[in-house]
Amino acid sequence: MALLDVNDLRVRFETHHGTVRAVDGVSFSLDAGETLGLVGESGSGKSVTNLGIMGLVPSPPGVVEAGHVLLEGRDLVQMSDAQLRGVRGNEVAMIFQDPMTSLNPLLTVERQLTEVLELHRNMTRAEARRAAAKGLDEVGIPEPERRLEQYPHELSGGMRQRVMIAMGLLCEPKLLLADEPTTALDVTIQAQILELMKDLQERRGTAIILVTHDLGVVAGMADRVHVMYAGRLVETGPIGSLFKDPRHPYTRGLLQSVPRLTGDPDVALDSIPGQPPDLAALPPGCSFAPRCSFAKPTCELDQPALDRIDSQDTRSSACFETQNLPGESHQ
Amino acid sequence: MSGAILEVRDLCKYFPMGKSGWRGAGQEWLKAVDGVSFDLHPGQTLGLVGESGCGKSTCARTIVGLYPPTAGTIRFNGNDLGSLSPRGWAPYRRKIQMIFQDPFASLDPRQTVGSILTEPMAIHKLGKPRDRRLRSMQLLEAVGLNPRHLYRYPHEFSGGQRQRIGIARALALEPEVIICDEPVSALDVSIQAQVINLLGELQQQFNLAYLFIAHDLAVVRHICHRVAVMYLGRVVEVADRDTLFANPSHPYTRSLLSAVPHVDPEVESVRQRIVLRGDVPSPLDPPSGCTFHPRCPERDQVSGDRCSVEVPILQGSGSGDQQRTCHLDT
């Protein structure tokens, strides 16, 4: 059995512009120790998918309309708040993008770390303090005892993100949801944090869902990638084959529009024409069709389903024209 | 140097911080920019890269006159700007424009696009109102927006479109130099590529010189002709783009480049990163000697304590006009 099974998750937001289907029927599963990269641009629904898994969709205006999130067979969507509190921070932990706003500025590092341990592990204050110091040490924070006494504002951005990661890992969760964990950090600090996450995953076998817009970060971290566009998964597959031969026009456009450190820098970048769609007024057919250079008129009639596209059963694409796309690297 | 449209020499910008000692005798200074020099040529782009807090944005703001420089000279076509009064600045402000990072915060939400674009022309008394409106329409067209959107408000546009409005505003006064402060870092990749291409086209069309500030090295590689790397207020390496990316000579540049994730899982799985220890030190109390020495992975290749004592100067290192500040042997 997979560690996590997300089945037809649907989250909508009622806004004064109309109903926004931020997550529109997302299904996937994740095994223990696996890293899944969830990529897409702003508004594609990748963060809301994570919030939906954690039961943290702000309501109102958000509503989890349908779907099941099975963690080892138990449905998180059906759980009561009290039951969920026993899971959050314990079996499933989350790391947020901005370590400045997601740590409590009024509490010392010690209090923020020991809280989860006292709650979930019934530790005494002294035991929790020792465990917290050990946790900080594990994420490479020098002088953990002194850091415990400090407040978040006394730490640098990289340090704060380490504290967030330490907090997430204290109860040895089976699943870690990392929402843009390094986006607010400089590249040299990002490199440190990514190494750290990989190292901790190898030691503990934690499964990670990594939400990011940075295709480079995904390339280095993930085993599998799911690409989201306008609330839906448009392409999924193992990292290597998906990056080498993207079979959805959006994935292709995305990969071609990233500036790279290799290749000819004087050639203009391929960009995806147009703008990301207005989620409150999506076209009836394929949401990407208006920007797609491979679209046929019929693409605007129905929504394409996410279908298997290879014989090994590892890759899927939600595109009517997938089989007709010109081959790229496998000619 | 001849031919440069903008010459910056030994530019310093210090900010006064809290006072210490008896009656504030010991004034502390934050040296945000500490002796930066470079030339910018017409039709060329100079990239200014570095991590947060390295002084690249302060450098930009000092050059456009938003901060008075503490020391050093800024020459535009040979005229010293540093000594000018705000009134004296006016004719040069036309020639040096700026594009900001945040397309949401840098446009007045209560002005229509038309008034955002015509306001600078009105201030500089260019043309009649009708000519200004006509020019705004041409500008919108030049940046790939619909000229009929003149009467819309910024909130009606997406992030990428707003950044185009910001670019059109910068172009309104026919500048020769545009300071781009992280112009694409707030945009999604598909939109980012559009804006990068647009900046390139406009440069060719109007022979613009860009000072391009960014932290994303892959973006810099696509748009810049020459690149200066900053660390704690100083330029540590400057070189032509191809030289810098193929053959970085300062240990900081090397580790910065090695830290950038490649968009290729095969490269990523075998790549060796130089992971720097620790964080960037506080610019309030920068390390002695070479400010990079506490984090430098190649420090043990320099004998003795030269790195922690002697401040390295910017000098040639090997090929062409590549320069760096480092005690390592070339």
Image: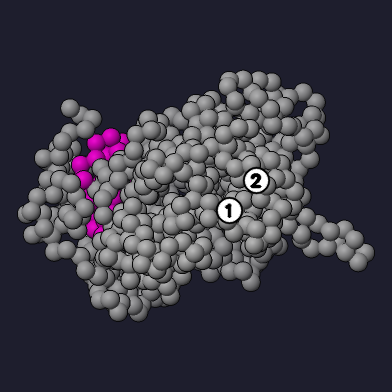
Q: Which amino acid does label 2 sit on?
A: Asn
Count how many numbered circles sit on residues in the image: 2
**C-alpha distance separating marks 2 and 1:** 10 Å
Q: Percent position (x, y) of residue A165?
A: 53, 54
Q: Percent position (x, y) of residue A211?
A: 39, 54
Residue B79's tag is 2
Q: Is label 2 in contact with label 1 (beta carbons under 8 Å)?
A: yes
The residue closer to the viewer here, A170 or A275, is A275
Q: Mark 1 points at which residue?
A: B92
Chain part drawn in magenta: A222-249
**Colouring of the image:** one colour
Other-residue count near label 1 (Cα within 10 Å), few / some / many at <14 / 14–19 / ≥20: some
Is residue A240 magenta-colored? yes
Q: Mark 1 lies on which chain?
A: B
Q: Percent position (x, y) of residue B34?
A: 72, 45
Q: Would you say B197 lies left or right of A320 here?
A: right
- Which quadrant would residue B85 be assigned to in this image? bottom right
Q: Would you say B19 lies left or right of A1 here?
A: right
Q: Would you say A224 lies left or right of B269 here?
A: left
- Which quadrant would residue B48 be assigned to in this image? top right
Do pointers 2 and 1 mark residues of a single chain?
A: yes
